[in-house]
């Protein structure tokens, strides 16, 4: 079962060039049943990555372009009166798909952003007192422009915390960009991608991830990291219990992708920047720099 992840990663690396580690983190996030935030400047492949993963996983995919005038009903749907049947009928919005790309999420107002909160946390939405379940599996991949760009609304901490991971793609290296300029259109390549991991198998893998063993020593290391963030002067706000669970779940998925049935401290370190960087208010957005004091000062027992 684990080998299928390698086939998927190989296919994704043919589309997103020179970003194998970021793609692996993105798949790790999905295996851990988490939502993904990709923050970077326009044009570096954020949307392409989301579309590639949806295609390789065989998921129903819907892109929502967030703008300053988008309304919550444009995302979750609305109840509309049916004159023919003299009754109200709920018309589901684009959130009722297995993978939803919230493109440029920070260009929408906080009211529109908050429409995703219940869906991301509970995997259902409530409209006029009635609850509607979302499909399984269900993922939100959101892209975000840097906060210094014109027309952005910063995501509140409660919204950021719903994302298991935050990634920055960055520019490709010289060789990868040369191949990109020389090769075919990414859109045409994506359309020809076969399904490498169907939804049913993905659900089985997600369950298998939950069975990965965590020893007491690794659990103590995870707790030491959480405690350090709460007591260190490097951070304005430490990791919450939900963040601790997110860190452990991501480490389990990372171990699973390495075909191991137990988590090592190195698994926690591998996912720490992506899981903790956006949750720790440290005065900058460089996830690697944010978690550097943790990796340097929290010992592995």
Image (cartoon, rainbow, N blue to C red):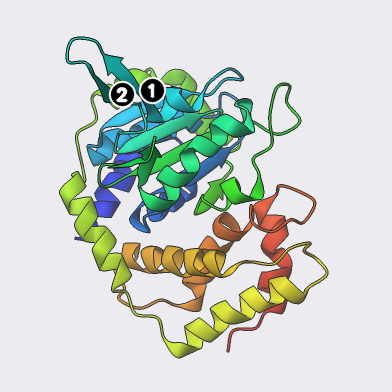
Left or right of residue 56, residue 12 in this image? right
Query: What residue is rendered at 31% in x and 30% in y?
Result: 61
Question: 26 or 114, which is in the foreground?
Answer: 114
Determine whether 2 is above or below 53 in the image: below
Mark count: 2
Toward the top, the furthest residue is 84
- The quadrant of the rendering that contains the C terminus is bottom right
Query: What residue is rendered at 36% in x and 20% in y?
Result: 187
Secondary structure state at the residue bearing disc 2:
helix
Determine whether 83 is above or below 160 in the image: above
- The quadrant of the rendering that contains the N terminus is bottom left
Secondary structure state at the residue bearing disc 1:
helix
Residue at numbered disc 1: 186
Q: Which mark, residue 176?
A: none
Query: How many angstroms separate mark 1 from mark 2 (CA)?
Result: 5 Å
Question: 99 or 20, which is in the foreground?
Answer: 99
Residue at numbered disc 2: 189
Mark 2 neighbour class, 10 Å CA radius: few under 14, some 14 to 19, many 20 or more: few
Evaluate whether residue 242 shows in this view. yes
Determine whether 235 is above or below 58 in the image: below
Evaluate whether residue 15 shows in this view. no
Q: Quadrant of residue 100?
A: top left
Left or right of residue 299, residue 221 in this image? left
Determine whether 115 is above or below 1 in the image: above
Query: What residue is rendered at 76% in x and 76% in y?
Result: 231
Mark 1 neighbour class, 10 Å CA radius: few under 14, some 14 to 19, many 20 or more: some
Residue 205: percent from left, percent from top:
24, 59
Toward the right, the furthest residue is 233
Residue 275: percent from left, percent from top:
55, 58
Q: Does the residue at mark 1 contact the one at mark 2 (Cβ under 8 Å)?
A: yes
Query: What residue is rendered at 79% in x and 62% in y?
Result: 236
């Amino acid at each position: 079962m684990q080998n299928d992840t390698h086939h998927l990663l190989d296919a994704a690396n043919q589309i997103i060039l020179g970003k194998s580690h970021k793609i692996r983190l993105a798949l790790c996030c999905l295996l851990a049943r988490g939502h993904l935030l990709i923050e970077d400047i326009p044009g570096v492949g954020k949307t392409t990555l989301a579309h590639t993963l949806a295609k390789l996983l065989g998921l129903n995919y819907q892109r929502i372009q967030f703008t300053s005038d988008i309304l919550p009903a444009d995302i979750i749907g609305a109840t509309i009166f049916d004159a023919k049947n003299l009754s109200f009928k709920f018309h589901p919005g684009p959130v009722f798909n297995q993978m939803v790309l919230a493109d440029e999420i920070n260009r929408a107002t906080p009211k529109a952003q908050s429409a995703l909160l219940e869906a991301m946390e509970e995997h259902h939405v409530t409209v006029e007192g009635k609850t509607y379940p979302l499909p399984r599996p269900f993922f939100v991949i959101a892209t975000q422009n840097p906060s210094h760009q014109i027309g952005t609304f910063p995501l509140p901490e409660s919204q950021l915390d719903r994302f298991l991971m935050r990634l920055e793609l960055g520019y490709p290296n010289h060789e990868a960009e040369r191949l990109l300029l020389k090769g075919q259109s990414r859109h045409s390549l994506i359309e020809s991608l076969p399904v490498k991991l169907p939804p049913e198998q993905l659900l089985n893998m997600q369950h298998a991830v939950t069975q990965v063993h965590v020893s007491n020593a690794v659990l103590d290391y995870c707790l030491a990291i959480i405690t350090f963030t709460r007591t260190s002067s490097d951070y304005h706000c430490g990791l919450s219990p939900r963040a601790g669970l997110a860190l452990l779940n991501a480490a389990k998925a990372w171990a699973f992708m390495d075909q191991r049935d137990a988590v090592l401290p190195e698994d926690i370190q591998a996912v720490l920047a992506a899981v903790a960087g956006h949750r720790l208010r440290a005065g900058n957005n460089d996830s690697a720099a944010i978690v550097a004091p943790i990796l340097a000062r929290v010992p592995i027992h």
